[in-house]
Image (cartoon, grey):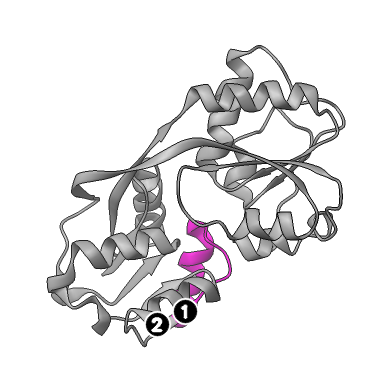
């Protein structure tokens, strides 16, 4: 059995994907996602005033918040707007609203920042849509590259009163832990300190998160460069099964 961390909105889809792949997994949600519509609407107003801007979407939740705001405001992306999403799942949330969304080969913050479009941002207006709190790596890097950066926090993560599991967990049967974000990994470690999670092997999606886990005393860490369910499942079947 594998233990897979996902925010609540992704729990059911991830559980179904692992089940269809005939991998025994319990998907656990420690947080849920709450949109902040007022901020998403403000981002739409900003876009109307900066028609040639680059929009950077850090998650599917950010893309969904923007989609809802555009629909509510009965507006569309200006034709010259370029859109960058951290991964395919994030891009898919904008299907029908944009002709093209640029995504990196590596679905991570690091992969996004490696895109040629974001290498030299001198004087470029960039709109960054993200969750409240969290890491500042993307924004700090874009500013360092010369971007004229505007940020809207269009959703927030809310810690659940009790974790939600797709199926009951048997800690003795755990064969590995999958964590696709540093925040989810830390929540899991904080919530289940008594389970000695350091003894298990972990799979994550970037060297940055792996290093965060090493600082927590975890030694068995592997990296899959894609965060979507199908890529994680393929990696597990090839390397852990």
The image quadrant of residue 168 is bottom left
**Label 1 with label 2: CB-CB less than 8 Å:** yes
Q: In the image, residue 83 lies at what x, y percent?
A: 74, 41
Q: Residues within 10 Å of mark 1 (few under 14, many from 20)?
A: some
Between 67 and 161, the residue placed more toward the observer is 161
Name the residue that disc number 1 marks.
211
Residue at position x 29%, y 60% from top?
187
Name the residue that disc number 2 marks.
214
**Majority secondary structure of the magenta segment?**
helix
Residue at position x 67%, y 24% from top?
44
Residue at position x 34%, y 59% from top?
5
Q: In which quadrant of the rendered image does the C terminus lie?
A: bottom left
Instruction: State the SS at label 1.
Output: helix
Q: Is residue 207 above or below residue 30?
A: below
Between 104 and 214, the residue placed more toward the observer is 214
Is residue 191 highlighted in magenta?
no
Between 165 and 189, the residue placed more toward the observer is 189
């Amino acid at each position: 059995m594998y233990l897979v961390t996902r925010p609540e909105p992704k729990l059911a889809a991830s559980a179904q994907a692992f089940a269809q792949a005939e991998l025994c997994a319990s998907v656990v949600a420690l947080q849920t996602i709450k949109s902040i519509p007022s901020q998403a609407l403000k981002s739409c107003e900003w876009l109307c005033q900066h028609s040639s801007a680059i929009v950077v979407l850090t998650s599917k939740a950010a893309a969904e918040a923007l989609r809802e705001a555009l629909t509510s405001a009965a507006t569309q992306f200006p034709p010259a707007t370029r859109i960058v999403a951290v991964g395919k799942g994030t891009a898919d949330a904008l299907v029908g609203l944009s002709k093209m969304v640029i995504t990196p080969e590596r679905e991570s913050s690091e992969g996004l920042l490696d895109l040629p479009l974001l290498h030299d941002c001198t004087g470029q207006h960039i709109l960054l849509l993200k969750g409240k709190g969290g890491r500042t790596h993307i924004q700090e890097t874009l500013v360092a590259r010369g971007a004229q950066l505007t940020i809207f926090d269009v959703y927030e993560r809310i810690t659940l009163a009790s974790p939600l599991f797709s199926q009951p967990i048997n800690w003795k049967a755990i064969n590995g832990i999958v964590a696709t974000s540093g925040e989810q990994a830390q929540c899991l470690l904080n919530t289940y300190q008594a389970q000695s999670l350091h003894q298990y092997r972990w799979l994550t999606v970037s060297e940055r998160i792996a290093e965060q886990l090493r600082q927590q005393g975890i030694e068995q860490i592997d990296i899959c460069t894609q965060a979507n369910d199908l890529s994680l499942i393929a990696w597990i079947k090839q390397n852990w099964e």
